[in-house]
Image: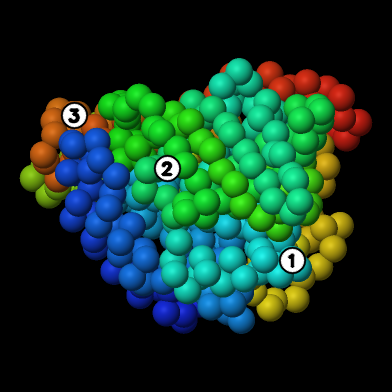
């Protein structure tokens, strides 16, 4: 099955590095799922290969990776261990915020160097008790006094927080600020104290170790990114998240469909000359997958043509590259997330229908149970119903024609 990005095409060391990580992740994926534990071995391999700093500029010790390269790596990991792939995607969606919006600040620039050279793992704390899943609202606030800040936050969902080295935390700019007036704060683990609440015994994505946090931090004011979080979210966090998650989810779908095709080929060798009953489902699923990957690839190419990230590539104005702006960008990315999460689920289901009991049973070369359970999370990470309602409202407010070539 075709992949979004062929890492070998770049000729960079990252191509070989990600394959070594894939081998480690594949060896431990079933145990991670069965035991519901953090994919420690795969994340250790990511550190060893220097991939946690992939987005950081080369001048700061990173690899200066493009969005296409990171999404391609997410997809490659998603084929063997969705939990590892999602941890990697979440980490880089946060790192993109720092790389795109904070490298002009001396403290932030030095910390980007630390992320690359020490291969620090970043976790996000954007959820908060009392606001639901609305990333663009905060109840807590930073308190800045004499060049230092304090912060306390009750977060219902923090993925792999117990294993993270750094936390990127949203909060109101001050105690009197409205919920949408937010900043993003970089908190190294040594500047934080926290207690995790609850456990993570989930249907799928069992290795992401998502629990609640009571989080407290203090540090120097320079740890607060100067750019308003509204801009960081719109230009970096949301695009990076949806594109990288799309890589993870299509990776799950690619692997499930590859197993289904292998099943049909095996059956065809046993019954030469006979058309296999699941062949039409293979066509349907492959068409869905091709369509999703085409949408993803177009947006990734537009993003990379517009933003250099950590590289020294020449970039162009969004009007030239086609990368959408403002409300149009929000609707395009929301529709992408909604559709890819839904259609990847359908692809995995079609793969299961093709494989039948061989796919339904665990422990066979055609088993698809883990893939099905993992892909179900895609529609719940920022619930699709909420996305559809909000995006529908944005669409009827826009003046542009819908559905035109």
In what element is the residue under mark 1? loop
* CA distance for labels 2 and 3: 33 Å
Q: Which mark is residue 180?
A: none
Above or below, 341 against 74 in this view is: above
Where residue 257 appears, x then y in whole percent? 32, 43
Residue visible at 73% across and 48% down in the picture? 232
Q: Quadrant of residue 363?
A: top left
Q: Quadrant of residue 222?
A: bottom right
Above or below, 376 against 297 in this view is: above
Q: Which mark is residue 360?
A: 3
Where residue 139 appears, x then y in whole percent? 68, 26
Where residue 22 appears, x then y in whole percent? 30, 61
Front disc: 2 or 3: 2
Front disc: 3 or 1: 1
Residue 143 horizontal side relative to residue 216, left or right:
right
Q: Are marks 3 and 1 in contact (CB under 8 Å)?
A: no
- For mark 2, what is the residue? 161
- Nearest the camera: 46 or 175? 175
Residue visible at 58% across and 57% down in the picture? 95
Residue that protrudes farthest toward the front in the picture: 146
Residue 219 horizontal side relative to residue 253, left or right:
right
* CA distance for labels 3 and 1: 53 Å
Q: Which mark is residue 105?
A: 1
Looking at the image, tell me whether mark 2 or mark 1 is earlier in sequence order: 1
Above or below, 189 against 383 in this view is: below
* CA distance for labels 2 and 1: 26 Å
Local packing at callout 1 (Cα closer than 10 Å; few below 14, some 14-19, many 20+) is: some
Where residue 65 appears, x then y in whole percent? 56, 70
In what element is the residue under mark 2? helix
């Amino acid at each position: 099955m075709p992949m979004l990005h062929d890492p070998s095409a770049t000729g960079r060391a990252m191509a070989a590095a990600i394959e070594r990580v894939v081998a480690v992740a594949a060896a431990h994926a079933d145990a991670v799922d069965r035991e519901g534990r953090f994919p420690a071995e795969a994340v250790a391999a990511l550190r060893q290969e220097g991939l946690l700093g992939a987005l950081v500029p080369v001048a700061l010790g990173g690899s200066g990776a493009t969005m296409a390269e990171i999404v391609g790596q997410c997809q490659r990991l998603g084929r063997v261990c969705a939990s590892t792939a999602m941890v990697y995607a979440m980490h880089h969606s946060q790192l993109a915020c720092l790389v795109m919006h904070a490298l002009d600040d001396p403290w932030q620039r030095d910390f980007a160097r630390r992320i690359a050279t020490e291969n620090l793992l970043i976790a996000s704390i954007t959820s908060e008790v009392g606001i639901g899943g609305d990333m663009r609202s905060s109840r807590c606030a930073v308190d800045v006094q004499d060049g230092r800040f304090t912060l306390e936050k009750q977060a219902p969902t923090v993925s792999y927080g117990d294993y993270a080295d750094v936390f990127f935390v949203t909060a109101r700019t001050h105690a009197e600020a409205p919920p949408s007036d937010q900043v993003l704060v970089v908190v190294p683990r040594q500047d934080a104290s926290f207690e995790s609440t609850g456990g993570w015994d989930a249907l799928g994505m069992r290795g992401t170790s998502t629990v609640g946090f009571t989080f407290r931090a203090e540090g120097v004011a320079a740890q607060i990114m100067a750019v308003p979080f509204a801009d960081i979210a719109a230009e970096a966090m949301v695009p990076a998240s949806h594109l990288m998650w799309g890589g993870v989810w299509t990776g799950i779908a690619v692997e499930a469909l590859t197993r289904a095709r292998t099943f049909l080929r095996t059956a065809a060798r046993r019954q030469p000359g006979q058309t296999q009953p699941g062949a039409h489902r293979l066509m349907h699923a492959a068409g869905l997958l091709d369509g999703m990957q085409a949408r993803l690839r177009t947006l990734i190419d537009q993003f990379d043509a517009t933003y250099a990230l950590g590289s020294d590539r020449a970039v162009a104005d969004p009007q030239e590259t086609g990368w959408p702006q403002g409300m149009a960008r929000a609707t395009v990315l929301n529709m992408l997330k909604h559709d890819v999460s839904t259609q990847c689920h359908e692809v995995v289901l079609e793969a299961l229908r093709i494989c039948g009991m061989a796919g339904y049973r665990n422990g066979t070369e055609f088993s698809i149970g883990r893939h099905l359970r993992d892909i179900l999370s895609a529609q719940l990470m920022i619930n699709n119903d909420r996305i559809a309602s909000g995006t529908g409202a944005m669409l009827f407010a826009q003046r542009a024609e819908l559905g035109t070539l």
